Amino acid sequence: MRSRYVYGSLLLLSICIVFGSFSINNTDDFDFAKREVLLRRIGHELLLQTGDSTSRVLPIEKVAENEYQIKFEHDFSFQPDSLVNTTRRLLAKDPFAVDYIVRVVKCGNSNVAYSYSISKNKKDDIIACIGRVQPSACYMINIKFKPTGIHTTKNSYLLGSLPILAIVGFIFLRSVKSRKNTAKDQSTTLFTLGSVLFNAKERQLIIHDRTIDLTGTEARLLLIFASSPNETIMRSRLQKEIWEDEGVIVGRSLDMFISKLRKKLEIDPKINIVVIRGKGYKLEISA
């Protein structure tokens, strides 16, 4: 009777691992497809920061194992600190992009115009030339990721090492879940606004070594603007989401908080909250 339970358990375990391996492979395929979407979003936001909302980000190319290239339709200039903040914020949504190197190369001759390295341990980051605006030119952005070591498991290994694979699979799935939760938390609280980093969770504006604290209302307002930069936000929406949902209806209070928030954003002259007459407000980020 006991042997039946043992054989039954081994059979069930083998079935779970075989199907689990297919599930892990599908998850890997999805994650790496998602990575290409994130890379295109990097190109999109980089162009928006220069004031370009019409030219195209060309198809993402995989130029080598774990290395991708972002190409653009037209020449553009960029701020290194904005590029660093944008890639860090968006790639936080990729649970396997913990270590990577970014190189901005010129079209034609592939000369490196700017590069930096991001590590899982922030103290190991290598970032230089922050604040030096790069001139307008034809650029391509190459991003090389450190190999994760995750590969498809062969059938022979599955059949020969079921108990070990079960333990490893359990630990791996817990690790992936933890990384995804961390990436989600980071992606919903950090925003790049020109050369300013907005930490919504800590209610802070950060530029170089300077930190400016925001009130709770200011942080909630800026979170709405930061989620839709260069887009008109209706006044009625701001009033509803900031005050009316809490049971308070205001009139001039919105203008007062917008004025206070605008004053704190003066740390970067390229960022401004402008009035759209008869509609609402817009967070403008100029090149």
Image (cartoon, rainbow, N blue to C red):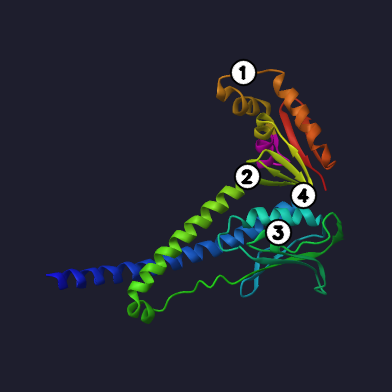
Q: Name the residue carrying label 1.
A: 249
Q: Is residue 15 above or below residue 271?
A: below
Where residue 160 appears, as percent x and y from the top left, is 34, 80
User: Marks 2 and 4, Cα distance to the nearest angstrom?
Assistant: 19 Å
| Image depth: mark 3 or mark 2 in front | 2
User: Which residue lies at the image location 47% right of the left edge and 56% below the top edge?
Assistant: 177
User: Marks 3 and 1, Cα distance to the nearest angstrom?
Assistant: 43 Å
Mark 4 surroundings within 10 Å by alpha-carbon count, few (fewer than 14), some (14 through 19), many (20 or more): many
Furthest toward the left, the residue is 1
Q: Is residue 18 above or below residue 274?
A: below
Q: Name the residue carrying label 2.
A: 189
Judge left or right: residue 131 versus residue 103: right
Q: Name the residue carrying label 3.
A: 57
| Image depth: mark 3 or mark 1 in front | 1
Amino acid at dot 2: Thr
User: Which residue lies at the image location 70% right of the left edge and 60% below the top edge?
Assistant: 123
| Image depth: mark 4 or mark 3 in front | 4
Range shown magenta: 222-232
Amino acid at dot 4: Gln
C-beta proximity under 8 Å, tags 3 and 2: no
Say which mark, if any, is on residue 196. Answer: none
Amino acid at dot 1: Ile
* Quarter of the image where the N terminus is located: bottom left
Where residue 163 appears, as percent x and y from the top left, is 33, 72
- For residue 93, what is the image quadrant? bottom right
